Structures are given as structure tokens and as C-alpha cells.
Image: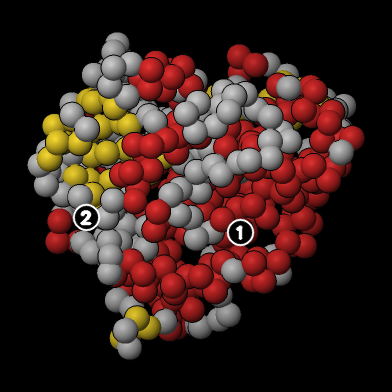
Amino acid sequence: MSTEHPPVTDWATDFDHTDPVYAANPFPIWDDIRASECPVAHTERYGGAWLPTSHALVSEIAYDKERFTSRSPVMSEHRPPIELAPRGIAAPISSDPPFHKGARRLLLPAFAPQAIDKLEQSTRDYCHELIEAMGDRDVVDAAQEYAQHIPVRVIARMLGFPEDDADRFREFVVHVLEGVDLPEERREEGMVTLFEYLQAQVEDHVANPRDDLTSYLIAAEMDGEPLPMEHVGGTIALLLIAGIDTTWSAIGASIFHLASTAADRQRLADEPDLLPVAMEELLRAYAPVTMARLVKEDMDFHGCPMKAEDWVLLPFPAANRDPEAFEHADQVIIDREVNRHAAFGLGIHRCAGSHLARMELRVALEVWLEHFPEFSLADPDAVHWSGGQVRGPRVLPIKVG
């Protein structure tokens, strides 16, 4: 989306995660940095940022709550004020201890396995509807006609938001996650639009309470006190943005892999019971999410002179491709047995919605394979991947039948 920054010429000293080259194929970039003398890249863009590429270093930072703050999980030209800590801009993902624990606990019932099970049939029905709407064409766009719609419907229903606003939700996602290198005024305009929309939805729920996640948050308490509206709005923004883009990216990337790899596609068609194991490998190999932290105080981190308020990106996809952590890390092995991947993050901010994401991914793939046991990339050169901290195919032409 964004083109405010010049192209990268040296990934070790001037990286940019929004660069089209990075979006299209970051794997060799991570490999080169990881294999170099220093496995942590640096850039002066975004006011200074670091990019560790090994599983060990990504994990160390993710678990380090003392030297890194989570108050903004999205790296951009703008740093949210320090005063926002410990809640941050979108609790609980932006929250530091001890606030984080209570904010996360509030969400757990809504994302428990029993609650997610109740959403499965409606999700499955909708996947069938999406494929039936494609008609009998030979070529369909698995990203634009399928993957991107599924989590939008699920999250809209969970929050009690109008399903007709799906296009607006996708606009919010693109702006928040892909427009990070826009000038601050344009970035701010988009964020104001998002929060004005959320304010209107919250106000409607205050006036007309119903049985959904928005009304639940409005009525919730932490430490015996009602949640401030800033907390409610930030958490809803998190669910709307992260709950949509991460899952749509994982579904699209999984279909991309199967369309690109006939042997894996055929094996899943022949052995549908293998899907849960294969899903975990697809999540490892194509993990969509990179999180951000901010450095609290000047320090030396394994020889890296990190300054207070420097950004640090945590590329969980790079950690998942580290040969020191996974055997044959660069290969997709759909029956991989030992697979403690980091697709859902590491540490206290590990994704609270992992049960939901797994259900949506499994159902989406089951329904897709049921309708299309044979499919392939219609035009590999036409596939387009998103830049930024959530990577997934945005254009994915698939030849079916």
C-alpha cells in the first residue's frame, strides 16, 4: 500500500518491512541476516529500529518484560506516548505487567474452545456460500473472494457489528497494518476514522445492549472498576484488526502453498485426517505475524547499542524458519511431528485468539478441499503479498478443477 520510503539497498543496515521485495519473499533476507556476523538488522527508518532473525533472540525479547515495552505492537513513524503504559493503545496486546494479566483474563472466556466450537457451523456454512458464489469459473481469487471474507464475518458477529460494513473493516485493516510508513498526519486521519466508527458502535451498544462481545466489554470490570471507554475501544480495535488480518493471511497463505505444491495438495485430498497436523506446519512455514516492542532504556543487547524508544520487530515467521530451532526449517513438511512453532507469538502476549484462528483455518481448508480437490496457481506472477507486520496474499488467482 505505502510507498513513502525509498527502496532498500542493504537489508542489514537499512531494512524496511514494507518494502515490496520484503513483502514478496522475506525468507532469503532473513536467512542472509541470520547467517551473518550479526543476526540483528538495524535501520534508521521509523526513527530507529532493530530486527532480530534467530529464534533464540526473538524469544529472548518476547519474554523480556523488564527491558522492552509492548505499549504499541505496530511499528510506525509515530510512537505512542509513554504515559499510555501500562495499558497501551489496544489492551491487552499493548499492555505491560501488571495491567496485562487482568486485561487478558477478560478476553479468555470469549475465546475458550467451548465458545469457539459454537461458531464452527456458521463459519462452515459461510465458507460454502462463498465458494458457491464463485459459480463455475475456472479461475477464482482465493484471497479476495474467499480468505478475506471469512474472519470478517466471524469477528463482526462476535462484536455485534453490521456485517454490511465488511468493506470498511478491510479498509481499517489495510490502513493500520500496511500504512505504517505514511506521514503522521495521514496516519492520524485514518486512525481517527477508525475510532470514530468504533465510538459509534460502542454508543449504540450502550443504548441497546445485546449478547455479544462489545456489550460484554462495556459491562466488564477490572479490579472492581468498569473499564474506561479507552480500554473498551482499544480492545475492540485489536479484535477487529488483528482478528481479521492474521486469519485471512493464514488461510490465503495455506491455499497458496497447496496450489504451489501438488504433492502436498494431493496428500491432503487423499488423507483429510492429516489436516490438523498439516495446518500447524503451514502456520509455522507461513506464520503471518510480526510484533513490535519499544526499548525502555539505553542498553547493549548482544552487541547492539539499542536506545530508549528504538523499535524492535519480533518476526515470528523468521524464528520459525531458523535451522537452529527446526530441522529442515526451510522445507514445508506437512506431517512434521515435532512442531513447537511461534506462529501465535511467544511470552505473555501469545495470541489469546489461537483457538478461533485454528478453527477458521481448519474449516476454511476443509471446505475449500471439499469443493476443489484439484487446484493450482493460475498465474504465479500475479500473486501479491501484503507488506508490513502481517504478511499474507492479497491477490491469489487460483485455477480450479
Near-viewer residue (324 or 380) = 324
Amino acid type of the residue that numbered disc 2 sits on in the rendered structure: Glu
> Which disc is residue 42 wearing?
none
Residue at image point 33% right, 32% down: 52
For the residue labelled by badge 1, is the local secondary structure a helix, a strand or a loop?
helix
In the image, 172: left or right of 62? right
Give the CA distance from mark 1 to mark 2: 29 Å
Percent across and percent down for residue 189 are 28, 47
Observer-nearest of 174 and 100 = 100
For numbered disc 2, what is the local secondary structure?
loop
Q: Locate the N terminus by quadrant.
A: top left
Left or right of 100? Residue 126 is right
State which quadrant residue 66 falls in: bottom left
User: Horizontal and vertical percent for residue 309?
Assistant: 15, 44
Please give the label number shown on residue 66: 2
Q: Which of the two labelled residues, at mark 1 and mark 2, occupies the earlier sequence position?
A: 2
Residue drawn at x 40%, y 54% as measured from the top left: 347
Instruction: Indicate the amino acid at tag 1.
Output: His
- Residue 355's tag is 1
Residue 352, given in percent of the width and then of the height, sits at: 50, 60
Name the quadrant of the C terminus. Answer: top right
In the shown orientation, is residue 372 left or right of residue 2?
Answer: right
Residue farthest toward the top in the current orientation of the protein = 9
Res. 316 image quadrant: top left
The number of numbered discs placed on residues in the rendered structure image is: 2
The residue sitting at 36% across, 74% down in the picture is 102
Q: Is residue 335 left or right of residue 315?
A: right
Most distant residue in the bottom direction:
224
Residue placed at 52% from the left, 54% from the top? 243
